[in-house]
Image (spheres, helix red, strand yellow):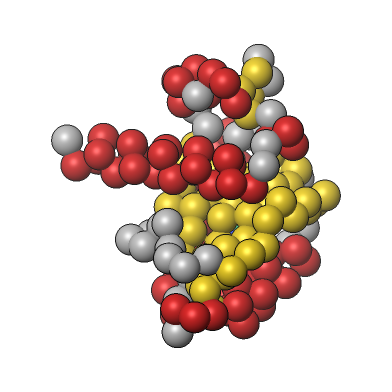
Amino acid sequence: MTDDLRRLVYYSRNRTVGAPEAVDATIRAILATSRTNNARVGVTGALMFNAGCFAQVLEGPSDAVEATFERIQQDERHGDVSLLAYEAVATRLFTDWSMAYVGASKAEADRYGDVADTSGFDIARMTGDRLCAVLHGLALEEEAAVAA
Ligand SMILES: Cc1cc2nc3c(=O)[nH]c(=O)nc-3n(C[C@H](O)[C@H](O)[C@H](O)COP(=O)(O)O)c2cc1C
């Protein structure tokens, strides 16, 4: 159903507090649920996390993307969900990922210096297209690093 393909990009504020181990466990749980659910309904995408923010791309059939985003918006592990883009697209960017994860590490922030400031990615100043391109670049790099 490629004629109904949509891409949604949002960012939000992290509401998960606690020791780094607890935050890591929360991220792992979100990813595990996302990968299972998204694969079932044909949603692909990527999730980025740094201490303060999440950014996520969801792509797939409109009904699946909308139902997934409805659940995500209700999730109390984050807040201030801001939609950056929701549009019809001809092809998927994240074909191979039910949910790629890109931690916004210091090294990555440095490499993408034009979109980062001292406190990490300044997501609020990015367009949906730019954020999507950054997440895709990071996902490809992480895939290459794992394969090497
Ligand atoms: C930042 C963030 C991103 C999430 N991304 C997804 C996602 O891509 N797919 C998904 O099914 N759930 C995602 N979730 C989890 C949903 O909010 C919700 O907890 C989950 O879909 C419930 O699934 P379940 O009924 O199978 O337990 C995300 C949650 C957060 C906080």
Q: Residue furthest right?
A: 80
Q: Quadrant of the N terminus?
A: bottom left
Q: Residue at x 54, y 19 (%)?
A: 113
In this orientation, does residue 67 appear?
A: yes
Q: Which picture quadrant has residue 19?
A: top right
For this view, does 33 lie left or right of residue 95? right
Going 59% across and 69% down the picture, which residue do you hit? 88
Q: Residue at x 26, y 35 (%)?
A: 145
62 to 73, vertically: above or below: below
Task: Count the marks.
Answer: 0
Q: Nearer the viewer, residue 60 or 127?
A: 127
Looking at the image, which is closer to me, 112 or 106?
A: 112
Expressed as whole percent of the image width and height from the top left, the position of residue 76 reads: 77, 58
Relative to 20, residue 42 above or below: below
Image side of residue 51 versus residue 113, left or right: right
Q: Residue furthest left?
A: 148
Where does ligand 1 appear, by image quarter? bottom right
Residue 94 vs residue 108, the one in the foreground: 94
Q: Position of residue 26 (x, y in %)?
A: 58, 50
Q: Residue at x 58, y 40 (%)?
A: 130
Residue 104: x percent and y percent? 53, 32
Residue 29 visible to an observer of this rendering: no
Figure quadrant of residue 148: top left
The answer to which image quadrant residue 85 occupies is bottom right
Compared to residue 104, the image places residue 129 above or below, namely: below
Q: Is residue 100 left or right of residue 5?
A: left
